[in-house]
Amino acid sequence: MAIVGGLRARLIRDSLFHMVYDALDDLGWFDVGRKHKTLSFPSVPVDPLVEVKFNTVSIGDLGTLAENWELGSNMSEFRWTIFVDVFAESEMLGLHLSRDIADLMSGRFPSIGRGRPTLTVLNYTQATPSAIFTCEVEDVVTDRAQNFPNPWQKNWYSVSFDLLDYYGDEND
Amino acid sequence: MAGTDSRFDAAAFRTAIKFAMKMGLPNATPDRATFRWSPQRTFAIEDPAHNPYDWSSTPKTEVTKVDVAVDVAVEMLGGAADETSVGQINNQKAQITILDEDYTLVKGADIVLLGTNTYVVDFVSPPLGLFEVTVYTLNITAVDEA
């Protein structure tokens, strides 16, 4: 029986959080002794209007666009726009970190297991989570804030992309 | 700490400031500034933010604190315009001034109730020193307006 509804969305979000965290860890971003402030990666989006500590990475999501995929069934493509914000201590660190995130989402880091633009979704409701389905990653875009009203937004970089999920109903 | 000076009577200063704070308090106790801590819960199976996937599940651990009310001065700052992805939102903002002895009682609280309205603590400004007295300022934003 397929997982649908809100639980499916939460499992996708949490799988994305774990994947990005683990990939940045594999790239050494959380290692001690590096010559930058420690990275912070909260599991919920930060409020950019409230002071954000330097070197904070934050995942947020926008709307979902559904498109019928198959005539005569509920099978649809769900395009979910995700963004990863980087509030960096410097321009170069923000550029480095945001482009690492963009390329790991695009599947350009096979050395750390990110060789395809996909996201494997795990069922975290199980004591030992197992893979249950895969989403595709498309339209990876990097951007940075141009007009920053607050000091912590000076090196605010952002990576956005679409997660494509395909499912019909819980009987699939 | 800004040091000490024999010409400054810290106890008299604290008493006078708290007298002024009490003078500005609303008469009805529920309307006075009340500090609240969100419950801290963990679950056997939970997401990275410690939310359960099954909202009816019983917490594995739960830490709650009772609300605390102390003498404060509240300054309403009006509705500062916050630019968001869905447009400009004018959230009511305020500053709360607390003396050091009372701040230790409410440190870490993430919610402040002012009357029937709920505010969240955005950040604590750098403390100000007045010889051995330290004054704290909490910057808060309304999340609802009854």
Image (cartoon, helix red, strand yellow):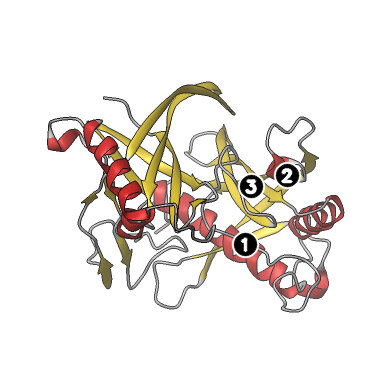
- Read off the residue under disc 3: A163
Q: Is residue A70 visible?
A: no
* Label 1, label 2: how far apart the Cα atoms are: 15 Å
Could you say which disc has been placed on residue A111 in the image?
A: none
Return the disc, 3 or 1, that comes first in the chain's sequence.
1
Give the x, y percent position of residue B18.
28, 43
Going from N to C along the chain, the mark reached first, 1 or 2, is 1
Query: Is residue A36 placed above or below A85 in the rendered structure?
Result: below
- Tell me the residue at 32%/69% (across/down): B43
Q: Position of residue A126 (x, y in %)?
A: 40, 72
- Front-lying residue, B22 or A6: B22
Q: Chain of mark 2?
A: A
The mark lying in front, picked from 2 and 3, is 2
Q: Is residue B27 above or below residue A52?
A: above
* Mark 2 or mark 3, earlier in chain: 2
In which chain is the residue bearing label 3?
A: A
Residue A103, by quadrant, is bottom right
Q: Which disc number belongs to residue A158?
A: 2
Q: Nearer the viewer, residue B9 or A91?
A: B9
Residue at the spot of label 1: A40
Q: Residue furthest right?
A: A92
* Left/right of residue B90 with respect to residue A19 in the rendered view: left
* Residue count near mark 2 (Cα–Cα under 10 Å), binned few <14, some 14–19, many ≥20: many
Number of the front mark, 1 or 2 = 1
Q: Are marks 2 and 3 in contact (CB under 8 Å)?
A: no
Name the residue: 76% across, 41% down.
A154
| Cα separation between marks 3 and 1 | 24 Å
Q: Relative to residue B101, is residue B137 drawn left or right?
A: right
